[in-house]
Image (cartoon, helix red, strand yellow):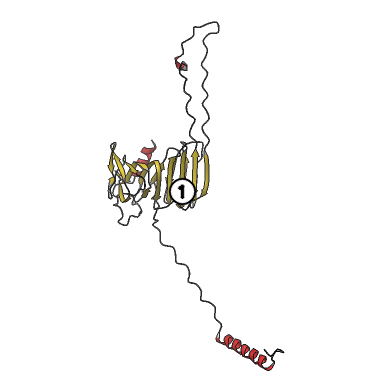
Amino acid sequence: MRYLLLLLSVACYGEAVDGYATVTNLVGSGFIEVAGKDVPIKKDARAIASNRLKTDKSTQADIILSNGIKLILTENSTVLLKTLKQTAGTLQPPSPDNKSFKELGPSITEVEVETGKVIGDVKKLVPNSVFTLKTPVGVVSIKGTVFSVEFKKDKDGNAVFNVGCLVGRVVVQMSDPKVAPMTVPAGKQLSMTAPAPAPKQEDKPGDKPKDKEEAKPKGEDGPKSEQPVEQPPPPPIKMEMTTLPPTAMAGVKMDMPPPAPPPAPKPPATASPDALDKIIQQVEINILKDQLNPTPTGG
């Protein structure tokens, strides 16, 4: 239903067409999963909705979407291009200088980050455009910013979710509906760690499964009613907002004008000619006094 409403919002501006993604730069190796088969990624390769992009170790892939969004896939990352929809006549080829650019009309972009880290560079989207990055624990909504989204599992099976914002702001909605949406401003990072749930208790060998116990004959006490099994509470979730680490956006090249050069240093203050003459005159007077009034030791 949500997807249908989004699609209608785009269609109201014109016919909705399928967008695409182009690999504009590749360092290392990776694959595009097409119909369940992995095809090696090559520069200028094109991917469409329903394709997965996978990067290997020590790999970085730069992706430009046909609506102008730039994504950088870091090493050991897997993303699913779930939805790429645009209004007809707004598809744009990738920029030759590998930069993001402004879109020409409303679009719907949904990317699922299954594992790894994605860095994005997005110009401000036009009204009614939707761009979201989904992970198993939360969804990030983008309107125009430089950001990073990371999802992974640590050695203990804990889910680790990091959302950083370098420019602009992003909105994060956790999968738990009890958690209100959170805004991550520029220069901040939202980090979440959810411990892995406790393993399910298995029946010991020789024990009869509870659901397969023989039905006891009705006696004086009558049939016993089944008591609902209490579910263990969900594992605690740790969240914190911290300063964005300097390494969070490593590899991203922002499409922003260079900073203004620092003001030229002021020249050192110099004495005016009149002041300099007075100093020389005072020195001459002091020398003359020393000559007329020698010290007792004759020095």
Q: Is residue 82 shown left or right of residue 243? A: left
Residue 253 at x, y percent in the picture: 39, 55
Residue at figure coordinates x 40%, y 43% from the top left: 116
Q: Is residue 209 visible?
A: yes
Q: Residue furthest top?
A: 220
Decide which of 235, 289 is in the foreground and name it: 289
Where 4 sits versus 103, above or below?
above
Q: Is residue 12 shown left or right of residue 153? A: left
Residue 287 at x, y percent in the picture: 64, 90
- The quarter in which the C terminus is drawn is bottom right
Local secondary structure at mark 1: strand
Decide which of 141, 4 is in the foreground and name it: 141
Q: Residue furthest front?
A: 297
Residue 46 at x, y percent in the picture: 28, 46
Residue at figure coordinates x 60%, y 86% from the top left: 279
Decide which of 183, 290 is in the foreground and name it: 290
Residue tagged 1: 164
Residue at figure coordinates x 65%, y 89% from the top left: 286
Q: How many marks?
A: 1
Residue 93 at x, y percent in the picture: 28, 52
Decide which of 149, 129 is in the foreground and name it: 149
- The quarter in which the N terminus is drawn is top left
| Amino acid type of the residue tagged 1 in the rendering | Gly
Q: Is residue 11 visible?
A: no
Residue 289 in which image quadrant: bottom right
Circle 1: is it few (<14), some (14-19), or many (20+) Cα within 10 Å?
many
Q: Is residue 270 shown left or right of residue 134? A: right
Q: Residue furthest right?
A: 296
Where 86 sits versus 291, above or below?
above
